[in-house]
Image: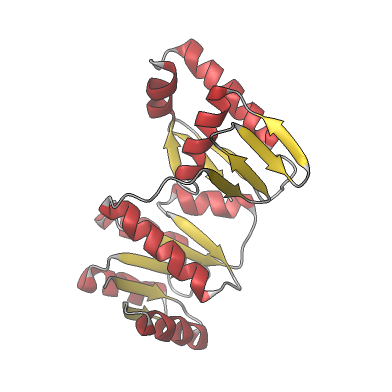
Amino acid sequence: MANVLLVEDEVFLGQIVKDSLEVRGFQVQHATDGMQGLTFFAQQKPDVVVLDVMMPQLDGFSLAQKIREQNAFVPIIFLTARSQTVDVVKGFELGGNDYLKKPFSMDELIVRIKALLNRQSGIPCPEPESYSIGQYVFDYPKQKLLFKTQECALSYKESELLKRLYQNRNQVLERTAVLLELWGDDSFFNGRSLDVFITRLRHHLKQDPKIQIVNIRGIGYKLII
């Protein structure tokens, strides 16, 4: 089973998370501050890192940045009481792969850990016909976006773009890759067309304020749920 580095300065919460993960077969190393977490990372070389954001000596954002200097691929999950988009975006820009807002359920943390590990190992997941995106349901085969009793028909490109954003949710979807795959080339005019479709998707998803599609300048887009 995977090795988890947990960096959490709330000792009681950290022990609960550690015990819960170990019961499910994970091996867990618990650090109680950022500097200790950095030391443990170098020593243990974990398969996944779970970081609290607000910590003494070295906060979670700074620790993630230092981890990324050593390892560009290890999955990083942030645990945070912060919910503002600017904080979430900062975490992703510094190399985070996912985040959970406190308080969180252990089941959700475990699902997210497993999803990141499976994605990294290349294990394919069954393709669902519909996706839950916040309060929306995205019916991919029918190219429809459902919000409560409302239904919105999507164009082919809107549907394909939303699917890719969702499959890479909380991670960067590279602009060039999307242009090559859906438009055939990454010319200036196709880039402007992609921007228009992103704007349309933002409009379609605006009824759920917890959903954001943010620009990562010079790289691409990120669907934050």
Q: Is residue 103 visible?
A: yes
Quadrant assignment for the N terminus: bottom left
Q: Give the colouring mode of the picture.
A: secondary structure
Say above or below: 162 vs 170: above
* Image position, residue 72 (x, y; %): 29, 51
Of the pair 103 and 143, the residue shown nearer to us: 143
Of the pair 91 and 213, the residue shown nearer to us: 213
Of the pair 97 and 91, the residue shown nearer to us: 97
How many numbered circles does the render carry? 0
Say above or below: 53 vs 127: below
- Quadrant of res 77: bottom left
Q: What residue is drawn where x is 55% and y is 36%?
A: 140
* Image position, residue 28 (x, y; %): 32, 79
Q: What residue is drawn where x is 46% and y is 44%?
A: 167
Q: Is residue 224 visible?
A: no
* Image position, residue 158 (x, y; %): 57, 27
Q: What residue is drawn where x is 59% and y is 24%?
A: 197
* Image position, residue 82 (x, y; %): 61, 63
Q: What residue is drawn where x is 41% and y is 68%?
A: 50
Say above or below: 137 vs 203: below
Q: Is residue 182 left or right of residue 102?
A: left
Q: Is residue 54 left or right of residue 22?
A: right
